[in-house]
Image: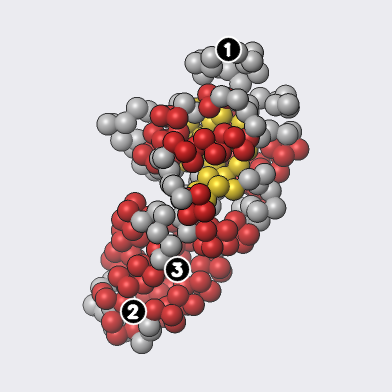
Amino acid sequence: MAAKNQRVDHMDLAIDGLIFDLDNTLFDFDGAFAGVANKFYEQHLKATTALTRADAVAMMTRWDHDLYATTQCVPNLKERRFVRWLSEWPDTGLDIAALNRWYDDSMDQQMQPDLEVNGLLADLNDRRVPWGIVTNGPSTMQRHKCQALGLDQLAPFIVISEEVGYAKPDHRIFRDALDATRLDRPEQVMFVGDSPATDIDGARRFGMRTAWVRRGRQFPFELPPPDHTIDSVTEIRHLIDAEPTR
């Protein structure tokens, strides 16, 4: 562990705390969403569109990525998703309310705790490593995900953009997370996330160290690279100081 007043600027120094993004970091949201989109095609689109399953799922996935990139703090994010679906496919026989219920039931079936990830998080608690979750999105939706995945029982704190009124990459949400860890300096903390801009560059600008969950992608050349690139959050085990932080 670094001395109290020492500036941490070497990769071989210990990490005192961890902050995790939620979607596509602790939870494979893209995989779950693809499962829901495939089910939607099978149950509601197959007989009403000339699109192939692959093309329809790709469209829904692309729309969702665009939506999350522009409406992270908007409480009606889900409704905007369904307006787009029903404007593209008006012959499903569903309205917004019915589609909302169908989506929630279908997504719930996709949300299963990841035993390996939750085991890592439980180990952090056993070792008294300060950590928490910072996620952009509507409060009700993100809280529900954490409950379904068993993360609410593990996380010492969960910071959600809608609840605090600002979203990653705003430095204030990283400050809130740092304060919640009770650590003194951002460089003591590693932020683990999948978004190059909102997670990695946002945390870097605040002064945190970073681990990028690449998910088969290349990191954007126009951004400073992350400190670490990983394929799963479980790979951070070897980066954590074995000694208790406090």
Q: Please name the residue shown 63% across and 45% down the image.
A: 157
Callout 3 environment at 10 Å: few (<14), some (14 to 19), or many (20+)? many
Foreground residue, 159 or 101?
A: 159
Vertical order, 83 against 141 (above or below): below
Q: Please name the residue shown 43% across and 62% down the image.
A: 75
- Location of mark 2 (residue): 45
Residue 230 locus on image (x, y percent): 48, 35
Q: Quadrant of residue 57?
A: bottom left
Residue 173 locus on image (x, y percent): 49, 41
Left or right, residue 56 beside residue 79: left
Vertical order, 195 against 148 (above or below): above
- The quarter of the picture where the N terminus appears is top right
Q: Secondary structure at mark 2?
A: helix
Q: Please name the residue shown 36% across and 56% down the image.
A: 71
Q: Please name the residue shown 57% across and 34% down the image.
A: 178
Q: Which residue of the protein is positioned furthest toward the left in this rendering?
A: 50
Callout 1 environment at 10 Å: few (<14), some (14 to 19), or many (20+)? few
Image colouring: secondary structure
Name the amino acid type tagged 2: Leu
